Amino acid sequence: MPSRVLIALTCLALWVLAGCSQPSTGSGLAVGDDAPASKIAGDATGAKVVVYYLHRTFRCAACNALELMASSVVHDTFASEVDDGTVEWKTADFQDREELAKRYGVSGPSVVVVTHAEGKETSHRRLDELWQLRTDPVAFRAALVAAVKKALGQDG
């Protein structure tokens, strides 16, 4: 009997861990007709970048670490933009907010950079590569900063 419990717990743990570490599939880039029509606060022209961390209801240690790293990069690097509303950090459970999962092609925990212009969502990029970079803080930071700068039109 104890061996059955141990096997069941081991299988459950592997299932949960495998689910948490799987990045979403797809291109990660979309520009679209399905963007919401609602106005979004931002600068005077309505330009804004929203960085989402979309997670499952159950959150493992790796998921929590990815969120903490991404949040720290956004708030530390783009502090003035966060203060003036040009950059916004949001988290959401994509299992509860199915419209976000569908819109951004999310099936696993993901960081998504969403660009707004004239108050409307114009594009998004899912940063699947951050999962592989989470053990390299310098590369992780560089990838996220570059994506947000590109969304802000600061490619250089």
Image (spheres, helix red, strand yellow):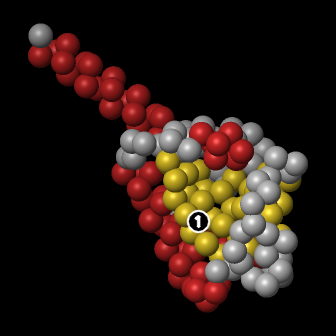
Q: Position of residue 89 (x, y in %)?
A: 57, 69
Examine the rendered structure and indicate whether residue 119 appears above or below residue 44.
above
Is residue 81 left or right of 11 when viewed as pictured? right
Is residue 83 left or right of 145 when viewed as pictured? left
- Residue positioned most to the bottom: 80
Is residue 29 left or right of 66 when viewed as pictured? right
Residue at the spot 36% in from the left edge and 51% down from the top edge: 61
Residue at the spot 38% in from the left edge and 30% down from the top edge: 14
- Residue position for label 1: 140
Q: Quadrant of the N terminus?
A: top left
Q: Position of residue 37 (x, y in %)?
A: 79, 57
Examine the rendered structure and indicate whether residue 153 appears above or below residue 109.
below
Mark count = 1
Residue at the spot 48% in from the left edge and 60% down from the top edge: 67
Task: Give 144 or 132, whichever is nearer the viewer.
Answer: 144
Q: Position of residue 58 (x, y in %)?
A: 39, 42
Question: Could you say whether the residue bearing mark 1 is in a helix, strand or loop?
Answer: helix
- Can residue 107 be seen here? yes
The three-letter amino acid code for the residue at tag 1 is: Phe
> Where, by quadrant of the figure, is residue 78 drawn?
bottom right
- Can residue 21 be seen here? no
Residue at the spot 53% in from the left edge and 78% down from the top edge: 75
Task: Give 133 or 124, whichever is nearer the viewer.
Answer: 124
Q: Quadrant of the C terminus?
A: bottom right
